[in-house]
Structures are given as C-alpha cells and as structure tokens.
Image (spheres, rainbow, N blue to C red):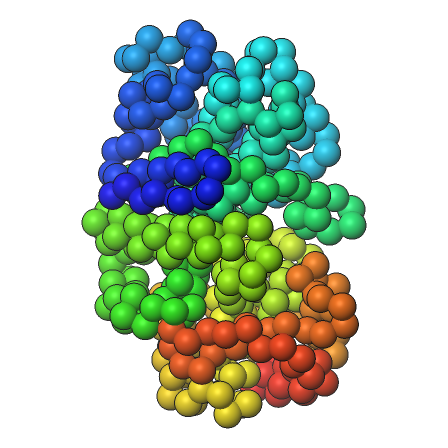
Amino acid sequence: AVIPVSIADAPYEVRIEAGLISRAGENCRPFIRKDHVAIVTDENVAASWRDAVTASFAKVGLRTEWLVLPAGEGTKSWEHLASVVDWMLAREIERKDNVVALGGGVIGDLTGFAASMVKRGCGFIQIPTTLLAQVDSSVGGKTAINTPAGKNLVGAFHQPSLVLADPLALDTLPPRDTRAGYAEVVKYGLIDNAPFFEWCEANGARLLAGDSEARELAIASSVAAKARIVAADEKETAGIRALLNLGHTFGHALEAETGFSDRLLHGEGVALGMALAARFSARQGLMTSQDAQRVVAHLAAVGLPSKLIDLGLDCNGRRLADHMLHDKKMDAGTLPFLLMRGIGQTFLAKNVDLADVAAFLDEELSR
Ligand code: NAD
Ligand code: ZN
C-alpha cells in the first residue's frame, strides 16, 4: 500500500509492503543527491539488516556509510544528538539531500531531530523497523530527545521525505516489542474506527504470530488513520492530533512510576492506559461496562497488560495522579483526558477532576 501524507508544504508517501527493506535502494534512489547514502541505525538493527540494506543500495550504485549507535532509549540524548549532527556535517550532507534513519522510534526521533537542524533542516527518510515506529513514530514529523527534565521535551516538527515500512522487518524484532507496538494499532480502532477494532479482535493473534498479510493490513490501516489526523492538525493546535494520546496520560504515569524501564515498555503502558481510560469512562457513566470489558478482554487476550494489579506497584492513586500533573500535555491547571463514549468514540474531556481519577486508581490498584 502507498499512503500519502498530505502536509501543506511537504507532502510525502508512506510505502508499506513485504520485502521493502530489501528494496530500500531503488525506493530511496531519487531522494539521494550524492554517490553515497548516510544511514543511522542501532547495533541490534545493524546486526539483522545492515547487509541486506547495503546490498540493496549497491544495486542502484550507491555506497553506504553507517553510523551505528547503541540500542535503547538512552541514545535519545544531547550527546548522541551532537554525534549524529557532527557525523552528518562531516559527510557534507546538503539541505536537499536525505539521511536515512533505519530503526525503531529511538533512531527515528534522534535522526529526525538532527536532520531538522543540519543546514537549518535537511531531508531524512524513515525506514522503521519496529511495529511502534511503523504505525506511529515514523509518520507525523515529531522528533525529540530526552533530557534530565523529562522525555521528549526537546525536539522539533520535521517531516520525513519518505517512509518505507516493511512488515518483514518485524521478523527479527523480539515478540515483546511487537506486542507493545500492537497496542498502538488497537488505539486507532478505539479512537474512531470500531470496525477496525473488530478486525483487531479477529486478527490480532494472527498478526502477533507473524502473519505478514495481517501485519501489512494493520500497518496500512494505522498509517492511514495517523496520516489523516496529522494532516488535519499537523502541529497539534486544533485538538485533533491530541486524540493520538488515548491511553497515554495513564500510560505515562505508569511509565514514570516504573522508572521508564524494561518493567513496562511504552506500548505496554499505553495498553494498560487504554484499559484504564475505558474503565474510567464506564465508571463515569460515559460508556457501557460491556464495551469497557471488551477493550480489556482484547488486550488481555493478546498478552498485553490490562489490569493495574498485574504491575504489582507499591503506590496509591494520588501518587499516579501526581505524575499526570507533570505530563507535558497539561494545559494551565486543567487535566484534559481522552475518554470514550464507546468503542471508536474517543473524545477530549476537559476539566476531569483529578480527585476522581485518584479515587478510581485506588480502586484499580486493589481490584
Ligand atoms: P526502540 O527504537 O528502542 O526499539 C526497540 C528495541 O528493538 C531496541 O532494542 C532496538 O534495537 C530493537 N530493534 C528495532 N528494530 C529491530 C528489528 N527489526 N529487529 C531486531 N531488533 C530491533 O523503541 P521503539 O519502541 O521503536 O520506539 C520508542 C521510541 O519512540 C520512544 O523514544 C518514544 O518516545 C518514541 N515515539 C515517538 C513518537 C513520535 O511521534 N515521534 C511516537 C511514539 C513513540
Ligand atoms: Zn505511544
């Protein structure tokens, strides 16, 4: 599938197809202005995909130069940002040339941010290799690093020139990471597409077991949803792009409480966050408890965390609610919350009372 992202001054395509990573060379060729291409990746991705990507560029007469960074969230740092920028400058990347980001959200966010500042903004191509990056972070132009003050607090809006998503790239991804990325797929169904949530209920297990066709369809549906939302609200000013944060307010609080560690991956936090948003919506009388239960049941069925008690946290609702106050999405004292009127009917609730949230979380922590 080819999904256009219709951003006013820089439209681009997301191409989704099995085997695309081995055809990276021919797909990227028109975007490269020199006789070589600069590729940023991490050590895990390099171990699995460097040879195939090198060969595909060689086929179209392009030499590859590689910057292989350590894997993990710690790489989204000032230090690594400086090293990517300096490395690109040493390769004399021109403003109209493109650097390639081959990897998950960490490599995409870091390389995209570096590209946004080299020569006041050069091009970059995303070749996302995790499900999370394919369905979410590679599309939409948000780039960032982490600092001691928090995650993703320093960054830029900088859209890629092209995105190549290959479902076969996931063959080497650890199953836990694939499952975590799948939470963001389910999210698109819950936001505004009940039939897609039903598709997930019927096909999620097949997708996670490795079915390439199911993966391709899920990526294409997710990217189409994200492209539509981003085109309507590129810089998150109209309140539409905020819908993509479903499950993220609860999720970030849980990630903060578990120290942004392997104890809870981002997508796992989002899964639990969506389950909590559904249950809180039901408790507020917004959504039926049957619908909320369907959300929880599907997440549990595919092995994602869906009950707060499973995390074994040693804290109370107030403390989790306090983490939410520190979320950067907080707007002048009110806590905007994404709640549901039903499956596929997410809306931005203004002025949710934090005390109600804390009381709800206390119940969930002991249930
Ligand atoms: P990641 O990039 O750290 O990748 C997860 C792990 O999988 C890493 O160890 C990586 O080395 C490994 N890996 C990646 N692809 C592989 C492959 N094909 N085979 C084997 N191993 C592979 O994490 P992620 O989950 O992709 O991304 C998380 C990041 O994305 C976070 O920093 C988050 O803030 C960011 N993010 C950004 C946006 C956005 O809009 N820009 C949206 C959501 C998340
Ligand atoms: Zn997310």
| In this picture, residue 316 sits left or right of residue 221 | right
Q: Residue 238: which quarter of the image?
A: bottom right
**Residue 77 position in % (x across, y down):** 69, 37
Q: Nearer the viewer, residue 299 or 8?
A: 8
Check the image and name the residue furthest to the bottom: 285
Residue 39 against residue 169 in the figure, above or below: above
Q: Nearer the viewer, residue 339 or 355?
A: 339
Look at 28% across and 25% down and name the residue there. 23
Residue 39 against residue 158 in the figure, above or below: above
Q: Is residue 238 visible?
A: yes
The N terminus appears in which quarter of the rendering? top left
**Residue 83 position in % (x across, y down):** 67, 23
Look at 43% across and 64% down and name the residue there. 187
Check the image and name the residue furthest to the left: 213
Q: Nearer the viewer, residue 117 or 76?
A: 117
Residue 55 against residue 188 in the figure, above or below: above
| In this picture, residue 241 sits left or right of residue 211 | right
The C terminus appears in which quarter of the rendering? bottom right
Q: Residue 11: which quarter of the image?
A: top left
Look at 35% across and 38% down and name the residue there. 13
Q: Is residue 106 visible?
A: no
